[in-house]
Image (cartoon, rainbow, N blue to C red):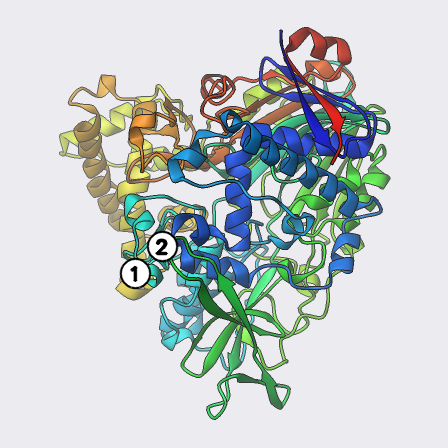
Amino acid sequence: MNRTSYPLTGLEGPVEIRIDRWGVAHIRAGTTLDAFRAQGFNAARDRLWQLDLWRKRGLGLLAADFGPGYLAQDRAARLFLYRGDRAAEWAAYGPQDTRAIVTAFVDGINAFVVLTEARPALLPPEFALTDTRPSRWLPEDVVRIRSHGLVRNVLSEVARARVLARAETRNAGLAADDLRKRISPPHDPVVPDGIDAAGWPDDLLDAFRLATAPVGFTPERMAATREEAWHWTRVDAHGAVTRGPRAAPKEPAEGSNNWVVGPARTETGRPILASDPHRIYLQPSLRYAVHLTAPGLDVIGAGEPALPGISIGHNGHAAFSLTIAPMDQEDLFVCETDPEHPDRYRYEGGWEPIERITETIPVRGGPDETVVLGFTRHGPVLREAGGRAFALRTVWSEPGAAAYLGSLAYLGATTPEAFGQALRHWSAPSVNQLYADVTGRIAWFMAGKAPVRPAHDGLLPVPGDGRYDWAGFHDSSALPSRIDPPEGYLATANEMNLPPDFPTETRKVGFEWAEPWRARRIRAVLDGQTRHSVADSQALQGDALSEPARRLADLVRALPAVSDPDVAAARAMLAAFDGTLHENSAAAALIEVFWGRHLRPALLKALVPDAETHRLLPPGDTQSLIERLEMGFDPATRDALLIETMGAAFRDCRARMGQEPATWSWGRLHHALFAHPLSPLRPDFAWDVGPLPVGGAAASVMHAEYRTDTFRLTHGASFRMVVDVGDWDRSVFINVPGQSGDPGSPHYGHLAPVWGRQDHVPMLYGRAAVDAATETIITLNPASA
């Protein structure tokens, strides 16, 4: 047993942190505020580099540490800081004293930062590599930063406007745009008066994409001179900040699955709740598991490392989980500026000033940089060009929209009704929340700020002259929910899950959802099980079946006899393929190469030959494309397209994996690599974890989105959890690649092999079980200021 102790200023009494063999910190404190102080201290102990980078990125302070190459990203981030009433902000998160909780958490982070100043050996190695130091936090930092939160759909709005601008008719434009993104439920989009995207600048969304991009490090960017600073303003197809060509922006592939099975359908007679949020794969991971125990508080699960509390887990009575519910929480407003006075824009028959705010950005190795930010009543100005100011209206500007902080309100909920009431304080991201408790009750709530749009539907940019303004937000009671459904389970996977009787045309909460594949598969599996188990949930989280892959294989199998031996060999390989993308499957490799690298691009080009329109559509909406392929071509044309692209795909696989198809496998191509952000600077440090062969794809429950050029995973389930509600120590989780972000920690990458084989580790809760699994005990003692 390893034991150590540290002083921590502000503690009301001693706190014990027990680290179990899987890297989970079980924090036991005498008061709730001491638990949150210790949570901040422990988060910094495990994730200080990640926390420090999160803060500097969000506040626009990267250039101070990393030089002029980060100036543009700093300016962009500052556009989206919360600048509203601070008292309203703190009050928005619920009845608990959010400010006191956040202050205690930040005090804990700062205490560890101070400790590293006295004991440099505790400092993570990234600081030495970059010659930087961690900064102290203010409580306001936590709530001011908004640009890491997930809202939608400005990228899609602008793409749709551009597609329509190039079309000969409105219907032709909507048909082309359906290939890019399916509108659901069926709806005729409102095309606002006075909007024509034909002349909009290509860099219109650069500031938005910069503000939401992760922080990347390359020798070129780190060495950028002051003269080169504003060249680093573009974001490529994979989200990296670059000075090279920008890519047509796409909506991020963030998602998630969750389900809860009621006691009548489980083998134990207790509810089972499962959650696997899908986010971008990073090192360290975006989620951090922790257990907080104090009088009136006993919660375990995962949250954001930079926030107090948890958002996914349980409190010893009730369990809770979330997925993204893709409500539309942002709109682009196009403001006409005054030709005589470009600092004014037209509004309700007159002119309003653009508020100009001057800010100073510190820059490493040189003088500070002065930047000017513009704001309208709609929000920050992303770009000014051609007599227009493009401003973004987003829930980020509203009190209470710091992502996931609303979870503090429901940590103590013990009934569905109390849980739903707590969700009135949830703003962003918009989510599907599932609930289950020891009495056997289960529930679903959709939660988040949903704008009221009296004159439009959020699918296209709108004029900023007052005709299309938001009219507040829908009350949380206007969003759908279900408690104790008769079918005995609830499940969500980002699909269009508004009930049939929901007034979609009047409330207009959103018309762009995830494709239906994961949701269909989850429901099919759960419908077929009457005695669901924890093991069944674990298996379903790793389910690799892909409906698109099966339907594509059906089309290939239906082809007439062909003379091309490669196509004949491909058909033979797919003869028994059922759509399961197992990592050891050669057929899975072939079908994914066929679709991602050959058929899908060829199909988009065939359907939309205009090059300028075509560049706005990739990767394309899989549901729309497959439906067109199945029903929108004459058989001869479709067969010719399939034969040509399947032959090319078979030869592509041979070039990538060898001449003998028996040696091919999906996992040889499709892999997870958890790359440390500093690896481009020092690859010899070996801080990356992987590669690991992985099955699945974006359409499988085991969501595994990947780049089609390298087949490396980009998005998916880095955290998975299955809770046995009531027998808590039978619950399991995984957090890949590990709990710690410190490359020197034994918990840095140790969970990656477990995750790679679609397995989990225990999520222990009971005191005896935790004590038996403890490997390290850290004691925090009160210290004088």
Instruction: Point out residue 156 in the picture as x, y percentages from the top left corner.
Output: 48, 60
Crowding at mark 1 (Cα within 10 Å: few <14, some 14-19, many 20+): few
Horizontal side, residue 258 vs residue 752: left or right: right
Residue linked to disc 1: 228
Quarter of the view holding residue 467? bottom right
Disc 1 + disc 2, Cβ < 8 Å: yes
Q: Is residue 527 visible?
A: no
Instruction: Point out residue 75 in the picture as x, y percentages from the top left corner.
Output: 47, 61
On-image quarter of the N terminus: top right
Instruction: Point out residue 411 in the picture as x, y percentages from the top left corner.
Output: 78, 35
Residue at 59% across / 82% down in the picture?
465
Note whether 146 is above or below 305 in the view shown: below
Instruction: Point out residue 240 in the picture as x, y percentages from the top left corner.
Output: 37, 48
> How far apart in space, not on screen, are marks 1 and 2 (Cα)?
7 Å
Q: Nearer the viewer, residue 57 or 721?
A: 57
Quarter of the view holding residue 81? bottom right
Horizontal side, residue 636 vs residue 773: left or right: left
Horizontal side, residue 86 vs residue 685: left or right: right
Crowding at mark 2 (Cα within 10 Å: few <14, some 14-19, many 20+): many
Residue at 40% across / 53% down in the picture?
364
Note whether 433 is above or below 663 in the view shown: below
Residue linked to disc 2: 69
Residue at 69% across / 6% down in the picture?
772
Amino acid type for the residue under numbered disc 2: Gly
Amino acid type for the residue under numbered disc 1: Glu
Note whether 452 is above or below 763 in the view shown: below
Residue at 63% across / 50% down in the picture?
141
